[in-house]
């Protein structure tokens, strides 16, 4: 049994599908603070099999410990955490409490339960402003915001943990920019309030929920003046978790980038989305945001060599899959009726 923290969220729901499709049993732990349990109903529809859901917070060590013991968990994939860069500057202590302290309590519960295999969701924000491109895993770590620093501190904490106890097996995954949705259109990104990321905002403009996209800066040293980022399909990202979990057969720590190895500008994303959706996406230019850089994209060579993993889906497919999700679910999970499989009826069993 694999315990998946934050498993009802955007990335978590897609990781749930990847694990279930691989024949693994999954218990999802989520406090539903920024997610919707309807995503898990839909995961079951996609996979044709049940999973276990427990409404709990990783900051509650006793609750996590009891779940680990009750379901005979063999490994944990840890996705739970606050993730908005801007919000982290407004509420830094909440981010340290939830992300850093929450991980400490999760690890403590795992130690007590003798579960010592962990895959941790980190972020490319740990690199800070790029000193060179593409970014490889040896690039200096200089996060520039509280969110990035929480990921950095957790990475350092896990290194110390592995050094202190050689029985631990830890995979650290540095995400770049997850986008897209499952090809079924049943699960996807469902932001609460104003989207923090580009593609959900573009999609909401295309579906008529918002008037236009505000592009922060058009005077960068790039081909069209807008910022360049490494966008990776969320299904490719989910497969990366399965790859690293399969790789962690021996004790030690593995740190890998999950990205495509190339970047696309903001205007490229908008034009591609217009092409696949057949909808106009109005935009206007605004001032640069403090801390934004001209370009940021991964060197994914190590992931390919160490895990045999690489991204496979193009920007056009990312946009097409995201549009399918958005057009079929204009109000996200909140605008739909419960599906055939209800979380309240999930099969609960140990092992």
Image: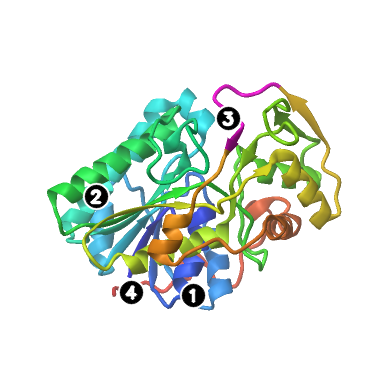
**Is 348 contained in the magenta span?**
no
Region rendered in magenta = 287-295
Binning the other alpha carbons within 10 Å of mark 3 as few (below 14), some (14 to 19) or many (20 upward) gives some
Q: Identify the residue shown where x is 67% and y is 57%.
A: 318
Q: CA distance from mark 1 to mark 4?
A: 19 Å
Mark 1 vs mark 4: give the one in front: 1
Q: Identify the residue shown where x is 41% and y is 74%.
A: 347
Q: Identify the residue shown where x is 66% and y is 62%.
A: 337
Q: Which residue is mark 1?
A: 21
Mark closest to the chain's N terminus, 1 or 2: 1
**Is 292 contained in the magenta span?**
yes
Q: Which residue is mark 2?
A: 107
Instruction: Determine whether the residue tagged by mark 2 lies in a helix, strand or loop.
Output: helix
Binning the other alpha carbons within 10 Å of mark 4 as few (below 14), some (14 to 19) or many (20 upward) gives few
* Magenta stretch: dominant secondary structure: loop
Mark closest to the chain's N terminus, 3 or 2: 2
Mark 3 vs mark 2: give the one in front: 3
Q: Which residue is mark 4?
A: 349
- Residue 221 percent location from the top left of the image: 67, 29
């Amino acid at each position: 049994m694999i315990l998946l923290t934050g498993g009802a969220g955007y990335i978590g729901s897609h990781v749930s599908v990847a694990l279930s499709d691989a024949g693994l049993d999954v218990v999802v732990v989520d406090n539903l603070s920024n997610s919707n349990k309807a995503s898990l109903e839909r995961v079951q529809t996609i996979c044709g099999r049940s999973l276990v859901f427990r409404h709990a917070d990783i900051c509650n060590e006793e609750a996590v410990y009891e779940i680990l013991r009750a379901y005979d968990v063999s490994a944990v994939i840890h996705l739970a955490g606050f993730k908005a860069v801007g919000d982290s500057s407004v509420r830094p202590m909440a981010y340290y409490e939830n992300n850093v302290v929450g991980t400490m309590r999760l690890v403590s519960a795992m130690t007590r339960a003798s579960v010592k295999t962990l895959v941790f969701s980190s972020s490319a924000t740990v690199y800070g402003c790029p000193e060179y491109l593409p970014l490889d895993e040896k690039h200096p770590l200089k996060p520039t915001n509280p969110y990035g620093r929480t990921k950095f501190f957790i990475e350092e904490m896990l290194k110390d943990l592995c050094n202190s106890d050689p029985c631990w097996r830890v995979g650290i995954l540095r995400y770049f920019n997850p986008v897209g949705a499952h090809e079924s259109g049943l699960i996807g990104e469902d932001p609460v309030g104003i989207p923090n990321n580009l593609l959900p905002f573009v999609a909401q403009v295309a579906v008529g929920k918002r008037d236009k996209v505000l592009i922060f800066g058009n005077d960068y040293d790039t081909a069209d003046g807008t910022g360049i980022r490494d966008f990776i399909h969320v299904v490719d990202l989910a497969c990366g978790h399965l790859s690293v979990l399969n790789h962690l057969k021996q004790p030690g720590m593995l740190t890998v980038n999950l990205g495509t190895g190339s970047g696309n500008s903001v205007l490229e994303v908008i034009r591609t989305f217009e092409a696949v959706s057949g909808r106009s996406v109005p935009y206007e230019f605004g001032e640069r945001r403090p801390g934004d850089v001209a370009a940021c994209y991964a060197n994914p060579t190590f992931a390919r060599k160490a895990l045999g993993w690489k991204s496979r889906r193009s920007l056009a497919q990312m946009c097409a899959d995201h549009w399918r999700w958005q057009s079929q679910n204009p109000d996200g999970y909140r605008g739909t009726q419960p599906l055939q499989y209800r979380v309240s009826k999930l099969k609960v069993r140990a092992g």
